[in-house]
Image (cartoon, rainbow, N blue to C red):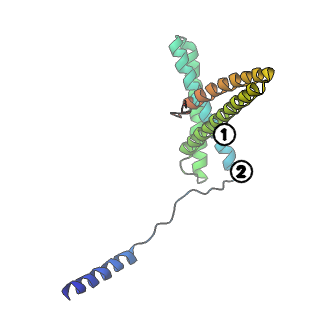
Amino acid sequence: MKTLGLLAAGVLISAATFAQTTTTPSTATPTTRTPAEQGQMKDMRQDIRAYDNEKADAKAAINKGDFAAAKTDIAAAKTDRTDIKADAATLKSEGVEHPVALADKQVKTIDKKEIKTTETNLTDAKKAEQADVKSGNITGAQAEQKDIKADRKDLKADIREARRDGVKHPAHRRK
């Protein structure tokens, strides 16, 4: 009887505790943006890409020993950085939370999508080449080999660009 009473008291206390907790409203950013915000985000993404490219060019120039070119690249990177800060300030005033991080994330997802499309083009070209070889179409297979070579070159360029933009592992090698 005593345990039944304690059990009932425990259930009542836990029910009272759960009744007092409130759910927090989600603070998710709105998915729809105004055209002005979309344009400013696009401008910020372009500025971020330009900033990353200028930094990489400056680093390459320093490694080559061309300090004059490195100095101009660093100056261009600084102007890109001020453009990014100005765009971020205007987007924050319009209510966009963390615009630089959001734009950087968008740049990375765009890079990953480009790599995936290039990879699918490469696999499609390989399959087409194999089909041409099986059917005995030598000229078609040679044309597909040229496409494969071009797609590999595009894939390398996309990976290089993605690494400049901060994607750590842009393409996982499959064997």
Under mark 2, the amino acid is: Pro
Tell me residue 25's x, y (percent).
50, 66
What is the secondary structure assignment of the residue under circle 2? helix
Task: Count residues near mark 1 (Cα–Cα under 10 Å), then give few for <14, some for 14-19, many for 20+.
Answer: some
| Residue placed most toward the observer, 75 or 140 | 140
At x 61%, y 25%, the residue is 156
At x 53%, y 34%, the residue is 167
Report the residue marked by disc 1.
43
**Can residue 49 be seen here?**
yes
**Quadrant where the image shows the C terminus:** top right
At x 70%, y 31%, the residue is 127
Q: Is residue 126 left or right of residue 72?
A: right
Outermost residue to the left: 2
| Disc 2 + disc 1, Cβ < 8 Å | no
Say which mark, if any, is on residue 35: 2
| Residue placed most toward the observer, 59 or 94 | 59
- Say above or below: 93 vs 7: above
Under mark 1, the amino acid is: Asp
| Residue placed most toward the observer, 8 or 21 | 8
- Numbered circles on residues, count: 2
